[in-house]
Amino acid sequence: MTMTRPQGGAPDGAERKLPPKPLPLQENKALTDPFWQAAKRHELVMQRCKKCANWIHFPREQCPVCFSQELEWAQVSGKGRVYAFTNVHQAQHPAFQADTPYCFAIVQLDEGPRMVTNIVDCAPDDVACDMPVVATFDDVSEEWTLVKFKPA
Amino acid sequence: MSLRGKAAIVGIGETPHKRSWPGRSAMGLCAEVAAEAIKDAGLRREDIDGLITMGGIYPSRVAEYIGIRPVNFAVSAGWMGSTSGVALTIAATMVNEGVANYVLFVAGGARDPENPQAMPGFRQEAGFQSEWFAPYGPAAGANTYYGLLYTRHMYQYGTKPEQMAQVAVNQRFNAGKNELAAMRDPITVEDVMNSRYINYPLHILETVMPVAGAIAYIVTTAERARTLRKPPVYLLGAGLSQGYDNHWYMPDMTQTPVVYSAPKAYAMSGYGPKDMQFAEFYDCYTILVSCCLEDAGLIPKGEAGPFFESTDTTYKGTFPINTDGGQLSAGQLNGIGASGCQQLVETVRQVRGEAGERQVARHDLGIANMNGGTPSQEATVVLGSANAL
């Protein structure tokens, strides 16, 4: 699939390949690899503070509650509820446009932390706040698996 | 020490808001409104000795282009949409402490179709966005954040999109009397509800349109203000509050940082929400106006829906809100920090009694709120005339 650049830049008639959907780009690979490697095994893990037992997401180098740097990775249930959602009709990145409308959501895990995700296996119109959901794993490339959620 | 009544806005400038503005740059538009504000105040270019400008640019570059010499103070402030309100608080402090005498705030942005910037959403810098947000396909602009806020508010309080549509309708009525606004034709609730979604539940008519333009104001001490050309518009109260970059990490997403900024502004001013005669509230989206009005105590929490159903908030109404049409009608000024300044500058016009056909009846005391981020940061200010001192 190709698209023409809307204005300026490319020479007349030149076509530009539609860039692919962005895959996760890590700022600190050593820190967040455990999350992504688990996702690849279709497991959901979260960071937890060994000192105060606070669950942490997004991953950090230090606990934002007690400032301890003794953190560990632990498996979570994968169960949660939709905290908030919005159904995308016009995506920021053109590679997502073919999928619209789709549900972009914040899910609150039963363990407490909230995460950005998509609600899948459900018509966007049927998504509701507080709806129980369960993690599902989308192998979007050979390297990357995204954690999404579907109705429980 | 309180800033109450110790500083005033003495000059303002605002260009028209245009969807595209061929041949004009951000710097050129900033220079134009700086000149307008200096003239409005009855000052000379040489009088400006302090400068606060938008985020992401060095103030020396802006000063050089305009031709001012902020020899005593300059800073670039980056509180996104709330920058102008933070700048007002900083400027008031600086003039009171004698660091500078006349501080200019200026910000703006260009949109020239002949000179397109890189397409948004393609460039990736490693960080939270690139790892935890972008792979899930967010909507264009800041829409995702406010769509999330909207569904959560609907869930917690029973808010209906038909009620939020009224925000856009009332503001568009006001814009009919604002020649600087990009969109002035009246709209109905039906028009809003029938307009397309960028992302449910946000219809496009509930969403700001980015535009070119620039905006400026000048601050000095109350003492100096009384010697200048226009009636001083006094800063009576100011409150700032900073939340998180991603607002859904706050315990209750429907609560904006205004719950902290507004009480501080009221306490400094000696007035409360019931005393406010009109409100100019940052309005990137209908739902954001509603949440911030609630958190400022102007509407009970969760009751924005019924409030907009039953209250005339036009400039003729019982409680006028966004009397120039707000950003939803005028268009959101490009340039980090330019957008919210529209709310400040309109408050100044109303307090002065200079708002022409859209002048509100009671205009000695107004409240303005500038919002930035997702909503991540707020600046709330109470401004008033000499009668309100």
Image: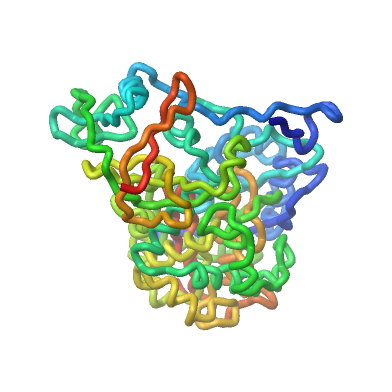
Furthest-top residue in this view: A30
Q: Is residue B24 above or below residue B206?
A: above
Residue A141 x, y percent position in the rendering? 48, 23
Left/right of residue B332 with respect to residue B101 in the rendered view: right
- Quadrant (top left, top right, bottom left, bottom right) of the N terminus of chain B: bottom left
Please, which residue is most extreme toward the left here? A51
Q: Is residue B125 above or below residue A120?
A: above
Residue A137 visible in the current orientation: yes
- Tell me how the rendering is colored: rainbow
Q: Which image quarter holds the C terminus of chain B?
A: bottom left
Front one among A97 and B244: A97
Viewer-proximal residue, B383 or B360? B360
Q: Is residue B386 visible?
A: no
Where residue B387 appears, as percent x and y from the top left, is: 49, 76
Residue shown at 66% from the left, 72% from the top: B187
Query: Residue at position x 64%, y 70% from top?
Result: B191
Is B354 drawn above or below residue A19 in the view shown? below
The image position of residue A86, as x and y in percent, is 47, 52
Q: Is residue A74 left or right of residue B287?
A: left
Residue B25 location, quadrant: top right
Q: Where residue B13 sits: x, y (%)?
A: 67, 57
For image coordinates 66% across by 61% down, the residue present is: B330
